[in-house]
Amino acid sequence: MRASVASKLRSLRTAGRPALRTRGAPEPWTAPRLIAWTAILVALAESAWLLYPSVRARVLSLEETPAVRGYRLAAGIGCFSCHGPGGNGGTKNPGSEEGEVPAFGEQTQMMYVKGEQDLREYILDGAPRRKREDADYRTKMEAAALRMPAYRPFLSASQVEDLVAFLRATSGQIAPDEALAARGAERAAELGCFACHGPLGAGGVSNPGSFKGYIPGFWGGDFDELVRDDGELRQWIAEGGIPRISEHPIGRIFVRRQVIKMPAFGHGHVQSPEDIDALMAYLRWIRAGSWKSLTRVAAGG
């Protein structure tokens, strides 16, 4: 009887108290709690996605050659509004002798420019001093609807050099003398290599989804990371990739998801294996930097 009364008293004391959980037991997943955690995870994922480009830029060694900087600067200061997209010409210029604004490429520069100093003066003052002092030249320029502006008040010395680097790279005047490499230069132009890899392989063309966010060029460390020897270079050209990257657990993810993919030129796009030899010789010529001496020679022409 006493035991029964005691039991009832204990029941009365604990009545209305919340049930005690065992320490460490997880809380039940209620709908509001599930929604809250889902929102947190979505916010974290969104933050990671937004921060990825800046984090990538800090962690990875992103390349930007002077020619790439010059290209972006040219786009930013309005050069392509007159000289055409990418400096490829086509903008009409009523009243001028040519009928249109000259392009930067296809060796057009040789008709107007004697060397790098001429390029600098075109950029800074609208024309080289020797032309500005020529009365006939001034008359021709006054008759044209579009005239080259003077950017001297708006550009730093380093920006001018970046523009010169871009103009030289895209000029079409820098080519190897050695026969095999020269043939490779012709094939590279025919296959459209520079549309993706930049003028003279300067790189910098955006490629969403790729490891570094752009298509690598031929000038710097990106090339060294992707091409360890001639065997890999041949595979890149012929097959559009190499197993070292396409079969890597992380590398293959970027290879699959990048928007622009390297074509496999060995599958019906080159005439013979010798064409690949020529392309390799041309790339090695670019890597050797011989074209830089050609730029200096042109400056003294």
Image (tube, helix red, strand yellow):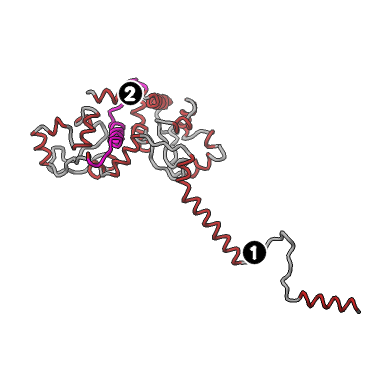
Q: Which mark is residue 102?
A: none
> Which residue is located at x 47 percent, y 43 percent?
56
Q: Position of residue 144 (x, y in %)?
A: 13, 42
- Pick whichever, 148 or 200, lies toward us: 148
Amino acid type, label 1 = Trp
**Dividing the image into 4 quarters, which one contains the N terminus?**
bottom right
Question: Are there few (<14), some (14-19), or many (20+) residues within 10 Å of tag 2?
Answer: some
Give left or right: position of 89 versus 135. Answer: right
Mark 2 or mark 1: which is in front?
Answer: 1
Q: Position of residue 154 (x, y in %)?
A: 25, 42
Question: Are there few (<14), some (14-19), or many (20+) residues within 10 Å of tag 1?
Answer: few
In the image, the segment drawn in magenta is: 153-180
> Which residue is located at x 20 percent, y 35 percent?
122
Give the image quarter of residue 24. Answer: bottom right
Look at the numbered disc 2 and give the secondary structure of its residue. loop
Q: Is residue 5 magenta?
A: no
Residue marked by disc 1: 29
- Pick whichever, 285 or 22, lies toward us: 22
Does the magenta stretch mainly form a helix, a strand or a loop? helix
Q: Position of residue 93 (x, y in %)?
A: 17, 43
Give left or right: position of 118 versus 13. Answer: left
Look at the numbered disc 1 and give the secondary structure of its residue. loop
Give the image quarter of residue 278. Answer: top left
> Which residue is located at x 53 percent, y 40 percent?
252
Residue marked by disc 2: 176
